[in-house]
Amino acid sequence: MFITFEGVDGSGKTTQAAQTVSFLRDCGYDVLAVREPGGTPTGDRIRQILLDDVATADMNPRAELLLFCASRAQLVAEVIIPHLEAGGVVVSDRYTDSTMAYQGYGHGLNLKALKQVNDFATAGLRPDMTLFLDIEPEEGLARRIAAGEDAGWNRLDAMALDFHRRVYRGYRNLVLAEPARFVEIDARADEATVQERVRAALAEWLEIQR
Ligand code: TYD
């Protein structure tokens, strides 16, 4: 089983993914948690370039795309596929849908080309289930500021709100296009409530898989 979490910045995805991993482990699954970009020594180096470096503030969107996909290719080959093949569950904080939403809908790169690059990078590996944490970008960004996460503020966060609105609309289109894979979670609530919703959705989905 390959499960991914998606959503705009500040949707609470990272916290929810971590709590979901604990839940699945308690259910007896052998769960590997990964995050994107990063998750391998190579990917972590790429992550530094993508997120931390002021010197890369003017990075071209196509260059950025290829770096995200380079990190993903390494992660899929080095850790995701071996774990799935060993019968384990993989939970990823972001995956190919982030590329479609951010580089495609956000930056306006060609969606068809992105699908091909994603498929190439992942060797065609798609998630079995994707939890979309649904919250408007204004609320997500406000939440991060309120949580005092300014220290974690990075180059990608700092882009105009307009960009994040396009990303959000992009996610909504992706969900509509693949209703069987996506599960929408209303993320406008406190952490515990959202986690309850995630667990309910997962339990239902696991039941169907049986
Ligand atoms: P991160 O610090 O992981 O943010 P978050 O906690 O919101 O996940 O940074 C990830 C950033 O990278 C986020 O702004 C989304 C962006 N991103 C892309 O633009 N394309 C991608 O393919 C991926 C995986 C992430």
Image (tube, grey):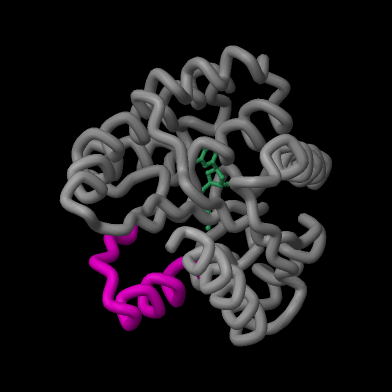
Residue in front for this viewpoint, 12 or 49: 12
From the top left corner, tell me how far across and down residue 23 is, in percent: 40, 79
Any magenta on residue 18? yes
- Magenta stretch, main secondary structure class: helix
Boundaries of the magenta span: 16-33
Any magenta on residue 162? no
* Quarter that holds the C terminus: bottom left
Q: Is residue 136 above or below residue 182?
A: below
Q: Is residue 111 above or below residue 208?
A: above
From the top left corner, tell me how far across and down residue 198 is, in percent: 58, 72
Question: Is residue 114 rendered to the left or right of residue 127?
Answer: right
Residue 35 shows in the view:
yes
From the top left corner, tell me how far across and down residue 2 is, in percent: 39, 50
Instruction: Tally the marks.
Output: 0
Residue in front for this viewpoint, 117 or 175: 175
Question: Could you tell me which residue is drawn at 52 percent across and 51 percent down?
Answer: 129
Residue in front for this viewpoint, 37 or 58: 37
From the top left corner, tell me how far across and down residue 28 is, in percent: 27, 77
Question: Is residue 183 rendered to the left or right of residue 99?
Answer: right
Question: Could you tell me which residue is drawn at 72 percent across and 30 percent down?
Answer: 105
Classify residue 99 by image quadrant: top right
